[in-house]
Amino acid sequence: MQIKKPASKDYRNILFSIPKTEIHLHLEGMASVDTIWSLIQKHKLEIPGISNREDIINRFKVKNLDDFIDLFLNVIQNCYREEIDLTLQMNDAREYLKRNNIIYTEVFFAPSKFLINGFSFDVMMDYLDHDAEKIKKEDGIEIKFLIDVSRSFGSENAMNNLNLVLKHRKPSIIGIGLGGAESKGPAKDYKAVFEMARNAGLKVVAHAGEDVGPESIWSAIKDLQVLRIGHGISAIQDKKLMNYLKKSQLPLEICPMSNIFTKKYVSSYKDHPIRKFYDKGMYVTVNTDDPTIFGMELIDEYLNLLNNNIFSLPEIFDLIKKNLYATFLTTPEKDAMWKKMEKVINKYK
Ligand SMILES: [Zn+2]
């Protein structure tokens, strides 16, 4: 893969200085190698192919989406053996958010594998909620959770996850998402789960068009009535869908490097449809998906878009604003946050 090295230091400093939001980010996707290695040692785990820190770094170099999901479920999530281990994960999240000056984020947390491993949803969420509150107090960074009910384990499991969310609703939980193996779990199978979530006042989003064609995006829109689409890049194959997305201004949570790493539809910035979507007038946002696993953090994403001449700096400012306005904050909250961001952005205009 040919990606120009970032970046003048100036651009990096500019991008750091602007407070930002991020809306497509998986909690364990912020795991540090040190956390994974410390958990392997703490619980004396035997994971095939991993006997030292270097092996973890190498295992993080994923080949495609299935390889990534295998890493996610069978290596990373398997290292967490008791609920309290998630506090290490929250610490990694805090460090990632601070490094990138992200002041508000909506993070996916996928409980399925942990529940299978015997964790209590209530206890897990207590830790996550408590740490989110602590991070808000200590660093002024706000973390909200979208519980990924998951399409990897079937609709019954997803309904079970939703029931747990409704039973143990913590202040930090704002909605649900549908992640996992897109090719194995058509969105329409989750219609009842999403309907129930919407009726309970939860926000709903779904990964679609990351690993499957435009029909998957249509289904997320029609069957699940999602408020945002995770990725959505296969929309490029369907003019009618692009027109619909333009008209509806349904936000796309685009994660350029993640798409390039998993290589389903694109293998370089040149192939990536993000610029075409933007020019079309569709609602585009930039996110990282799994920053520490891909070794590509939010500032790097914006820098790469600049350095590959996909977007100009003023357009990057616009993308930063679009990300904020696609969050589930209230309009007054968004406006207040935009004021803070704009103050910094105006210095560079
Ligand atoms: Zn994702």
Image (tube, rainbow, N blue to C red):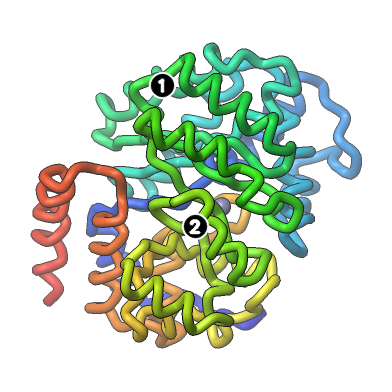
Can you tell which quarter of the image residue 275 is in? bottom left
Q: Position of residue 61 (x, y in %)?
A: 73, 59
**In this rendering, does residue 290 appear at all?**
no
Tell me which numbered mark, 2 or 1, is placed earlier along the sequence.
1
The residue sitting at the right extreme is: 48
16 with respect to 170 (left or right): left
Q: Position of residue 49 (x, y in %)?
A: 89, 44
Name the image quarter holding the N terminus: bottom right
Query: Residue 71, which numbered label?
Result: none
- In the structure shown, which secondary structural element does the residue marked by tag 2 occupy? helix
> Which residue is depicted at the point 75% across and 21% down?
117
Dot 1 corresponds to which residue? 129
User: Which marked residue is nearer to the observer: mark 2 or mark 1?
Assistant: 2
- In the structure shown, which secondary structural element does the residue marked by tag 1 occupy? helix
Residue type highlighted by circle 2: Lys
Dot 2 corresponds to which residue? 222
> Which residue is depicted at the point 54% across and 81% down?
238
Q: Position of residue 41 (x, y in %)?
A: 76, 25
> Which residue is depicted at the point 39% across and 32% down?
199
293 with respect to 139 (left or right): right
**In this rendering, does residue 298 appear at all?**
yes
> Which residue is depicted at the point 39% across and 19% down?
170
Q: Is residue 70 above or below residue 162?
A: below
Can you tell which quarter of the image residue 143 is in? top left
Say which of 80 and 237 sits in front: 237
Residue type highlighted by circle 1: Asp
Q: Circle 2: is it few (<14), some (14-19), or many (20+) Cα within 10 Å?
A: few
Does the closest atom of ligand 1 sit within 8 Å of the Cβ of label 2?
A: no
- From mark 2 to mark 1, how far is it between C-alphas? 32 Å
Say which of 306 and 183 sits in front: 183
